Amino acid sequence: MKMRKLGQHGPNVSVIGYGAMSFTNFYGPATVEGSCRILDACLDMGITHIDTADAYGLGHSETVIGDWLKARKGENPFTIASKVGITNDPNQRLKNNPDHLEKSLDDSLSRLGVDALDLYYVHRRDDRFEIEDVTETLAGFVKAGKIKAFGFSEIAPSSLRRAHAVHPVAAVQSEYSLSTRAPELGLLQTCKELGASMVAFSPVGRGLLTNRPHSLGAIAEMPWMKTNPRFNEPHYSLNLEYNAKFQNLAADMGIAAATLAVAWLVHQGEHVLPIPGTRHVQHLAEVAAGGSMDLSEEDLNRIETVLPAGWAHGDRYSVAQWVGPERYC
């Protein structure tokens, strides 16, 4: 497993991290036992970067990780990141006010059973507050020793520059994969320029870049997925046609499609850190393998031929799902 810096001044972490939203029922039923098996497997595979959020199962993901750490008698082998800002309050789904950020941070630390978070993100921007003011609040948490670094999720390059002018931003988390390449229109470059890691969530396109894409029947049982344009007809059938071509390319190279998708991301810059999530150890092994694979220029060209930029049919979010992420292109 290759290792990379998490932020310009942060710790070395495995180039492949783990996205612990999969410890909830977001993509299908999850169990505590299964989640603990995943954490055990992360150790075995050399994955050291775990990403979670207080919104994942209303704290459930953090609790699972905290109980797993407690069973190890406090030994923590992971660099842990969590996120704040998405709430279940129907009147105000996004909150970036200082009191909410601090209360949520204290709750996250309690659930995880750690004294400080290695990385703390604002999950979504609350446009009631200027990003400079939010950055000052996060910088105060660093000064207080509650977090070691901070970042933002789904922000525009312009917002990143504004925040960075106040205090160095360690990382930006955004959806980035062969099916979602918008970060290449400024965010990827700005992260590199400012020394921030680009943490790529959904690196296998929510299953579109694997050997086992979701069936329409399975999607119908997932509240978020069944409203996502890319997973609705006629878009989904068209996307599966591209999936088949990508599977064939990966098979020709002797690897799983998910391995190839993650390896492609790793080759997009030394500051790129994919964080795939899964409930299955077999799939975890496939994505982890992408962290040690070398691709030639010819390999990258073959991938680009099969999945050219802009191939995916349907928007990556529905109108409702676009509330929060910043559009910049």
Image (cartoon, grey):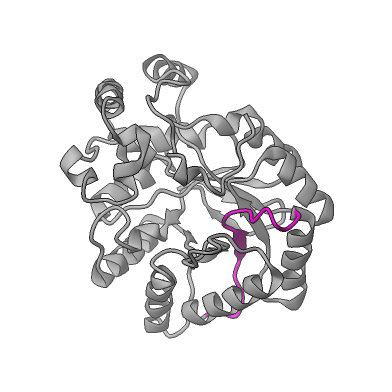
Q: Quadrant of residue 257?
A: top left
Magenta span: 114-130
Residue 194, given in percent of the width and then of the height, sits at 75, 43
Q: Quadrant of residue 139?
A: bottom right
Report if residue 210 lies within the magenta region: no
Vertical relation: 326 (above or below) 182: below
Q: Residue furthest right?
A: 165
**The C terminus sits in image quarter:** top right
Residue at 24 percent across and 44 percent down: it is 219
Residue 33, given in percent of the width and then of the height, sits at 24, 71
Q: Residue furthest bottom?
A: 73
Vertical relation: 213 (above or below) 311: below
Vertical relation: 167 (above or below) 97: above
Asked whether residue 210 is in view, the answer is yes
Left or right: residue 81 compared with residue 163: left
Residue 91, given in percent of the width and then of the height, sits at 53, 64
Residue at 58 percent across and 46 percent down: it is 154
Q: Quadrant of residue 40?
A: bottom left
Report if residue 115 lies within the magenta region: yes
Main SS category, magenta section? loop
